Image: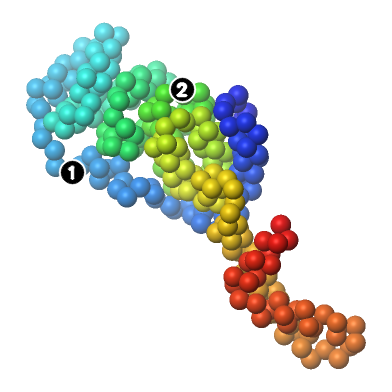
Amino acid sequence: MRVLAIGGGIVAVALVATATFMVVRSPDRDPQTSSVQAEDATAKVRRELPRDPEAEAQVDELVAEGGIVGERRMIELYRRWAGQDDKVWARRKIIDALLAHADKKRGMKLLLEAVAGDETPVKDDEVLAYAAEQLQAYWTDPAMYGYGRDMLLVQRDEKPRALLAESLVDYTAKLDESADPEYQLRTGLASDMVDVFYAAKDEGSREHMLAGLDQLGGSDMAKLMRSPDLADVGELSTARLRVDATQQALADMDEALADEDDADWSGMLGPLRELAGLDRDELEERLAQQQ
């Protein structure tokens, strides 16, 4: 786990320290999980939109021109065209061009610079979802994956942070155990999501990070971060698992001891039968009192 000097104080440190355990233990963790968003990135950008052929041709000219001047001009246009439906396809071309840079690290930095100047709220930015989808191609290179995680942690602007988080989460959540042994990447990224949650200032961005944590299997962590007072510990999946396991164990023991004549067991049978007979809410309450 990497440690950064960011906001969140003792609470953030405590949550990060437990992230790996809770993600690994969560019954919701599924290596085949797809995006938790209502629509995936592809669906968002493929809806019917007007197109501006002149804008797209302008981008093609800048791509052909190349060089620093062309890059700066594309970044400028990406920002200027924000929020214009007829420029969505042209902006997609800019994303593709920047990510096609021979130097992947520079290509990523140029893209982050471009999206940082787009003031569209994260939740309303359909082009951002496309950028996150295209950026996933970078993560197949382990060195770039590590670099992407580092860049995620040092971002100061909400939009680039959200872009990297969405892209890394969508990519990592699809890895099976053969590609991610013991889900080390998944749990490491979940810890990063806790860090960036406390670095984010905008509530929409914070919810974006929690959705990513949910997607990685850290639903308990996300619940704790949404409700730090832990008013209802029974809502946590780990608590539900413990209740289920306890009920089953008590039932099994009660059945095994039911015919036991040894006087040494006689004092245990009453309490065991009492616990085994509790309903779920009563058992949750009893377990919560023991915390």
Q: Which mark is residue 76?
A: none
Query: What percent of the width, then of the height, locates residue 290?
Result: 73, 61
The residue sitting at 38% across, 32% down in the picture is 163
The residue sitting at 66% across, 81% down in the picture is 277
Mark 2: which secondary structure?
A: loop
On the rendered structure, is 245 left or right of 183?
A: right
Kindly give the residue lying farthest to the right in the view shown.
263
Q: Earlier in the sequence, mark 2 or mark 1?
A: 1
Q: Is residue 15 above or below residue 256?
A: above
Q: Is residue 245 above or below residue 62?
A: below
Depth check, front residue: 130 or 194: 194
Q: Are marks 2 and 1 in contact (CB under 8 Å)?
A: no
Q: Pointer 1: what residue?
A: 47
The residue sitting at 75% across, 79% down in the picture is 272
**Amino acid found under the numbered disc labelled 1:** Arg
Mark 1: which secondary structure?
A: loop
Query: What percent of the width, then of the height, locates residue 274?
Result: 72, 80
Mark 2 vs mark 1, foreground winner is 2
Label 1 CA crowd tier, 10 Å (few <14, some 14–19, many 20+): few
Cα gap from disc 2 to disc 1, whole angstroms: 31 Å
Query: What percent of the width, then of the height, locates residue 69?
Result: 26, 8
Label 2 CA crowd tier, 10 Å (few <14, some 14–19, many 20+): some
Residue 67, visible in the rendered structure: no
Please tell me in which quadrant of the rendered image residue 79 appears.
Answer: top left
The residue sitting at 34% across, 34% down in the picture is 122
Query: What percent of the width, then of the height, locates residue 34?
Result: 39, 50
Residue 195, visible in the rendered structure: yes
**Amino acid found under the numbered disc labelled 2:** Arg
Q: Residue 156 carries which label?
A: 2
